[in-house]
Amino acid sequence: MGSASARLLKLFEGHRLTPTQRRIAHCMVRRAGDAPFLSSVELAELAGVSQPSVTRFAVALGFDGYPALRRHLRESEPPAEAESAAEGEGSTGLSEYQQAVHAEIENLRHLAALLEDPAPVERAGALLAASRPLPVLGLRAAAAQATGFAYFAAKVHPDVRLLTEGGSMLLDRIDGCVRAGARTLLCFALPRHPRETVEALESAREAGLSIVTVADSAFAPVAHTEDLLLPAAVGTGLAFDTACAPMLLGRVLLEAMCDGLPDAQARLEEFDARAGERGLFAE
C-alpha cells in the first residue's frame, strides 16, 4: 500500500495476538513512522504494557526478539521514508499545522488503497441497509462521526437510532433496538477508546447483532474476530486527534448503504421537495 502503517498491518496479518499484543500492534500502527526507531522500553511505555510483553509480542510475530523485529522494520522501510524519519519532520520547513495536513493526506491515501477491494464496504452497506432499525453507536470522540452518519442516513433509511451517550441507559437502548428488529449495529470507535464502547459491543454481540465497526486500526481495543471492522487511521500530530479518514469512510458506507435501499433516491427527492416548499435552505 506504500505507507508505513500499511506495511505494519501486513506484518501483523495472520497472527493470533493476545489483547496485550493487539495493544502493542495498535500503538505501532498509530506511531508507524517512529516504530522502527523505538526501543522496547519506549514502545512499552507508549503502549502502556511491560517491556517483557514487547519481547513476547516480537516472538509471537516470528522474530527472535524485539531487536530482530526492529531491524526488520528498518530494513523493509523505503530509503526515502527512512531518511525522513531519521532527520525528523521539523527539517522539512513545514509548520506543525502543515505537517498535520500532510499526515491526514497520507491517511486518506492509505484509505484509498484499502478501498481497492470494495467487497468489505459493499458487504457492510448491505448489512446496514437490511437492519430495521439501524443503531449507530459512537461515544466521546467518536460521537461526532456517529452523529454525522446518522444525520445523512436518516434521509434514506427508514429507522436510524443514534447512540452517543454512555451510562446505564446505553445497554437498555441497544436491547430496545434488538426488540424492535435490529440485525446490525454500526459503531464508530476512535481513540481514546471508552471502556463503555467495548462493553456495549460485547452486549450487542450477545444479543445477536452483527457489528460493523469503523475504527482507527484493525488492532484497536474494539476489534473482534466476529465483526466486520473497517480501519481508517486518525492523525496524531496535533493536541487532539484528527479524523478525516474515518469521516470519509463513513460517507463511503452511506453510499454503499444507499445501493442496498431501492427507494433511497426517491426519499432524497422527496426531502428536497419538502425542503424547497419550506424554504429550509438559504441558497
Image (tube, rainbow, N blue to C red):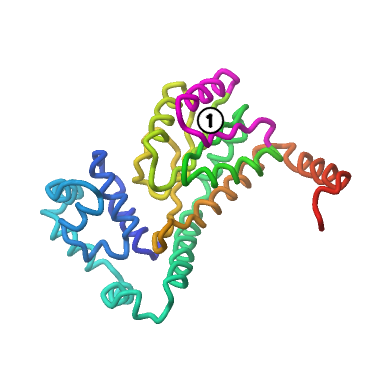
User: In the picture shown, does residue 95 fall above or below 123?
Assistant: below
**Residue 106 in sight from this viewpoint:** yes
Q: Residues within 10 Å of mark 1 (few under 14, many from 20)?
A: many
**Residue drawn 40% across the image and 48% down it:** 191
- Number of on-image labels: 1
Residue 174 part of the magenta-drawn span? yes
**Residue drawn 19% across the image and 52% down it:** 44
Residue closer to the observer: 107 or 8: 107
User: In the picture shown, does residue 253 fall above or below 181?
Assistant: below
- Amino acid type assigned to the residue bearing label 1 in the image: Thr
The image shows residue 153 at horizontal and vertical percentages of 65, 40
Residue closer to the observer: 88 or 123: 88
Stretch of the chain drawn in magenta: 157-181
User: In the picture shown, does residue 48 fall above or below 160?
Assistant: below
User: From this viewpoint, which residue is outermost toward the right?
Assistant: 277
The image shows residue 241 at horizontal and vertical percentages of 43, 56
**Residue 116 in sight from this viewpoint:** no
| Residue assigned mark 1 | 184
Q: Quadrant of the C terminus?
A: bottom right
In the displayed structure, does residue 210 sit left or right of residue 252? left
Q: Secondary structure at mark 1?
A: strand
**Residue drawn 47% across the image and 46% down it:** 141
Q: Quadrant of residue 20?
A: top left
The image shows residue 61 at horizontal and vertical percentages of 20, 49
The image shows residue 40 at horizontal and vertical percentages of 16, 56
Residue 78 part of the magenta-drawn span? no
User: In the picture shown, does residue 38 fall above or below 161?
Assistant: below
**Residue drawn 57% across the image and 45% down it:** 253
Q: Quadrant of the N terminus?
A: bottom left
In the displayed structure, does residue 123 sit left or right of residue 84? right
